[in-house]
Amino acid sequence: MTESVTTPQTTPRTPTEAVVRINGLSKSFDGRLVLDQVDLEVDRGRIVSVIGQSGGGKTTLMRCVNLLERPDRGTIEVAGEVVHSDGRTVCRDLPRLRRTVGMVFQRFNLFPHLTAVENVVLAQRKAGIPEQEALERAVTLLRRVGVAHRALGRPEQLSGGEQQRVAIARALALRPELLLFDEPTSSLDPEATREVLSVMRELAADGMTMLLVTHELPFAREVSDHVVFVDGGRIVEEGRPDDVLDNPSRARTREFLASYGTAS
Amino acid sequence: MSGLFQVPWSDYRPDLVDALWRTVSYTVVSFVGAVLLGLAVALLRLSRAWPARAVAAVYTEVFKNVPLLAIIFLTYFGLASVGIRLDVFTAGCLSLVVFYAAYLSEIFRSAISGVHAGQTEAGEALGLGRAGIFGHIVLPQAVRQALPGTNTMLVDLLKSTSLLVTVSAAELMSEGRLITSATFRALEVYLVISAIYFALCYPLSQLLLLLERKVRAGIPLSPWRRRRLKAARVLLASAVEADMKAGAV
C-alpha cells in the first residue's frame, strides 16, 4: 500500500510548529483540583507520552485537547488557533476542531450497532465526504491496520485488539493533524497489546503527531520524543524518554518508576 | 356442535371487514402517535432543565395511574360536556395515544439512558453534532433496547381498542355487540370475535419477535445500509484480488 492516509492535507509547515500548545491549564471536579497550572506542547510530527498514576490527571489533560473536558483556567491552542481560554470556549466550530484531533479511547467505544467499516464511514459522511470516497478510505484504513478481513463484522464479533485497531482506523478517517490515545492498551491482553502497539509504531514512523497517555513504559520509551510525568495534577518532570525514564531527577518520578518494577 | 354456529356469518362479512379495518386504523394511528409523543416525553424527562423533567414526570405518572376506560370516557363524554366535541375516531385515538405514550416514554427513557456515555463521547470526538450523535449513535442503540417492550405495547394497544366498544367506535368489538343484539348468539359471536383478535395479534407478535431477532443479530434492515455494505463488500473483494495479483507477480 503506497497511499499514506495519515498525512494531513495541509500545507507543509515549519517542523517546530506546535499542533497543541497548552498554557497554565487548571481544572477541578467538585472542588478537587485535578489539573494545576499545566503547560504542554506537542510539535508537529512529534510523539509525546504522558505517564503517571491513575487519577493523577493524565486523562483529563488529554481530554481537554479536544474539549471533551472544559478546563477552568488557562489556554488551549490547537493547530495555531486558540480554542479555549480561561474557562471560555473560544472555538466557534467545535466539530471542526474535533475533526482536526482524532481520539482513541481505552474502552474502544466503537458503535456496537454498526459493522467495522460503517464505524469508519459514519463521521466521514457527516463531514461531507462523498459515500464512495468514504468507503474507499475506510477499506484502505482497515487494511492498513490489518483488520480488513473483519470489515463486515460488528464490534461484539471482534477481539479486543481488532476493535481497538478499528477504532484507530476510525480516528484516522478524518485525516486529523493529531491523534490522542487514552491508555489504548489498558483493556487488552498482551497479544492484542502487541497488535495495537505495532499499528501505533507504524503511525509514528509515518510522522503522525501523537499525544499518548500510557502505562506501557517500554513503548513510551521506544516511540516518544518527549515524556511527561504527571502526578497530583502537575507536571513533575518531563524531557527525553531516556532522561525521564532512566535518569529521573525527581524523587516522585523515581518512586513512580520503582512501583513499575524496573522501567524497562 | 351443529347447534353452536347458527349466525348467518356470510351476511355479516362486509360489516366485519369494515370493523376489522377500523380496528387496524385505530391501532396504527394511535401507535404512531403514542410513539412520537412517548419519545417527546422521554426526551423531556432526560432534559437538563428541571421544569421540563417535572412536566414529563407528572404526565407519565398521571396517565399510567388512570384506567384507559376512564380516559376514553373523559375525552369522549367529558370533553363533549364542556363543548369540545370530538368525533369518535379522534377521541378514541387521542385516548389511546395519551395512555400508551406514558408507558412508551418509560421504555424509551430507560433505553436512551442505557446507551453508554462513551458512545456519545466517541461521537463528539469524531466531530458529530448533537443531532448527528442522537440520530446515528444513541437512537439506533436505544431502539434495539426498546424494541421488546415497545412490541408488547403494540399488541396490548391492539387489544385495548376493544375498550372503544363503550363509545360505539364501530371496530371489531362494537360489531360483535351489534351482531349479538341482532342474533342473541353471544357465545358464538364473541368466540368468533375473539378468534379474529387472536388471528391479528398472534402473527403480529411473532412478526415483531422476528424483527427483534433480526435487529439483535445486526442484520441491516434499511435499503440504505444494505447498499453501503454491498459497496463495501465489492471494495473489499477487489482489494483482496489486487493483493493476490501482487502476490503472484
Image (cartoon, coloured by chain):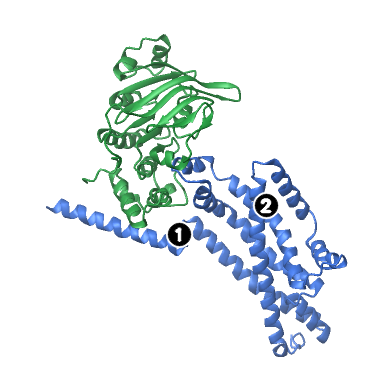
Q: Position of residue A152 (x, y in %)?
A: 37, 54
What is the three-letter code of the residue carrying label 1? Answer: Ile
- CB under 8 Å between discs 1 and 2: no
Residue lying at the far right in this picture: please name it: B81
Residue A252 or residue A233, whichever sits in front? A233
Q: Position of residue B12 (x, y in %)?
A: 72, 87
Q: Report the mark closest to the observer, 1 or 2.
A: 2
Mark 1 and mark 2 lie on one chain; the one further toward the N terminus is 2
Q: Mark 2 highlights which residue?
A: B41
Q: Mark 1 highlights which residue?
A: B219
Shown colour of chain A? green
What is the tally of numbered marks visible in this picture?
A: 2
Q: Position of residue B148 (x, y in %)?
A: 60, 57
Q: Quadrant of the C terminus of chain A?
A: top left
Residue B206: quarter of image: bottom right
Establish if B211 lies above or below A23. Answer: below
- Kindly indicate which chain is depicted in blue in the rendered structure: B
Distance from label 1 to label 2 (Cα)?
Answer: 29 Å
